[in-house]
Amino acid sequence: MPDALQTAPPTPQPLPEIQTFPDTPARDRLTAVAIKAFKALCTQWHPTGAESAALLGVSESTWDRIKRKPAAQTLRRTNSPESPPSPASTRA
């Protein structure tokens, strides 16, 4: 008699699609909220400036600017051909 507690292994579920917000209006609308949430996480986790910058995909100097004036920054995808260069990459 088969054991009633035996079950088939779970069927793997597909991962949800990662939201990247490639369009500028969505990035502009959500950046301030995202930065506020990220800064709140940083106050709890205490990452270094380099770690924080790496998590956001920006340079340390850009992270420092974002911390000072979050409303003046928009996070940009730097690995996309349609994305403009980040503020850090436009300095001479």
Image (cartoon, rainbow, N blue to C red):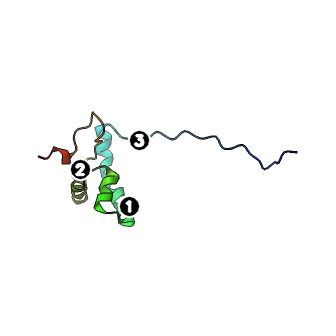
Question: Gap in Å between the C-alphas at discs 2 and 1?
Answer: 18 Å
Question: Gap in Å between the C-alphas at discs 1 and 3?
Answer: 20 Å
Horizontal side of 90 relative to 82 (left or right) equals left
Q: Nearer the viewer, residue 14 or 73?
A: 14
Residue position marked by numbered label 2 in the rendering: 73
Q: Is 34 above or below relative to 43? A: above
Q: Which residue is painted at 28% across and 38% down in the image? A: 24
| Quadrant (top left, top right, bottom left, bottom right) of the N terminus | top right
Q: Which residue is painted at 35% across and 40% down in the image? A: 21
Horizontal side of 70 relative to 17 (left or right) equals left
- Residue 48 point in image, percent of width and height: 31, 63
Q: Quadrant of residue 64 in the image?
A: bottom left
Mark 2 or mark 3: name the one nearer the start of the chain. Answer: 3
Q: Which residue is painted at 29% across and 58% down in the image? A: 50
Q: Secondary structure at mark 2?
A: loop
Residue position marked by numbered label 1 in the rendering: 41
Count neighbours of disc 1 (C-alpha within 10 A) and say few if under 14, some if 14 to 19, many if 20 or more.
few
Residue type, numbered disc 3? Gln
Count neighbours of disc 2 (C-alpha within 10 A) and say few if under 14, some if 14 to 19, many if 20 or more.
some
Q: Secondary structure at mark 1?
A: helix
Mark 2 or mark 1: name the one nearer the start of the chain. Answer: 1
Residue type, numbered disc 2? Gln
- Residue 57 point in image, percent of width and height: 31, 49
Residue 77 visible, this angle:
yes
Q: Secondary structure at mark 3?
A: loop
Q: Which residue is painted at 28% across and 33% down in the image? A: 81
Residue position marked by numbered label 3 in the rendering: 19
Q: Is 2 above or below relative to 70? A: above
Q: Nearer the viewer, residue 49 or 26?
A: 49
Count neighbours of disc 3 (C-alpha within 10 A) and say few if under 14, some if 14 to 19, many if 20 or more.
few
